[in-house]
Amino acid sequence: MPRPPVLPVLDWKAIFESGKPFEEWLEAGEHDKNREAMEQGLAGQELEPHIEALLGALPRPVHVVAIAEGWCGDVVRHAPVLQRLAQAAPNLEVRYITREQHKDVFVRFLTNGGEAIPKFVFLSSQWVECGNWGPMPAADRVLIARGKACGDVGAARKKTGLSYQMDPGRRIVVEELVALIHIAVSASP
């Protein structure tokens, strides 16, 4: 059996440092309407007290490389959630990059073989990749995959839209992102 190709090792620290903080990334965006929506999403994103406490007590740094572009509806919906978590966590730092800026990174995070953003890559304090999230909650990714499998992505997107409407506080996104943060700060298996 042939061996799969070995991907080159990524310098996650350099990739992270090449990214922009949220505010700079927003300002560099070309879509004023989406920028305003993300600012409003960030301002309105509530976190439950126990989540705020957990985030405030992270024992080590966690770095997140967010592959995101302001034109995308899922980015508009989910990037503010990640940024709100970072506001609550002194040890959580996020940097935003584009697909074009780091094609070698993005190609590793295709969704069902396709390009989809956002992708949030979680890194430990030692710059070790610990997991990734995106472009939408896990249950919605399953819906889209099933839609592709049966040839009806349109119906799957409608169901995903209904799923989003049923979770206006984006609690599922918060839960999934917090789970990845906890993996990245793990001191033991």
Image (cartoon, rainbow, N blue to C red):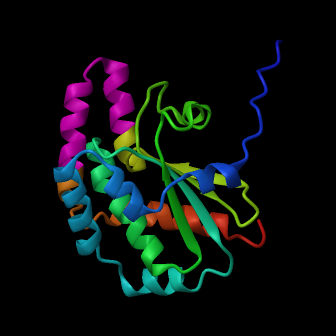
Name the image quarter holding residue 122: bottom right
Q: Position of residue 4 (x, y in %)?
A: 77, 21
Q: Position of residue 139 (x, y in %)?
A: 38, 46
Q: With respect to residue 65, does 91 lie above or below?
A: below
Residue that appears at 34% across and 63% down: 80
In the rendered view of the protein, which quadrant contains the N terminus?
Answer: top right
Q: With respect to residue 72, does 114 lie above or below?
A: above
Residue that appears at 56% across and 37% down: 102
Magenta span dominant secondary structure:
helix
**Name of the residue lying farthest toward the top:** 1
Nearest the viewer among 161 and 99 is 99
In the rendered view of the protein, which quadrant contains the C terminus?
Answer: bottom right
Q: Which residues are magenta?
A: 142-163
The count of marks equals 0
Residue 51 falls left or right of residue 165: right
Residue 69 falls left or right of residue 185: left
Name the image quarter holding residue 160: top left
Residue 144 on the magenta span? yes
Residue that appears at 67% across and 81% down: 59
Nearest the viewer among 124 and 69 is 69
Q: Position of residue 119 (x, y in %)?
A: 47, 46
Nearest the viewer among 146 and 181 is 181
Residue that appears at 49% across and 87% down: 53
Residue 134 on the magenta span? no
Residue 49 falls left or right of residue 158: right
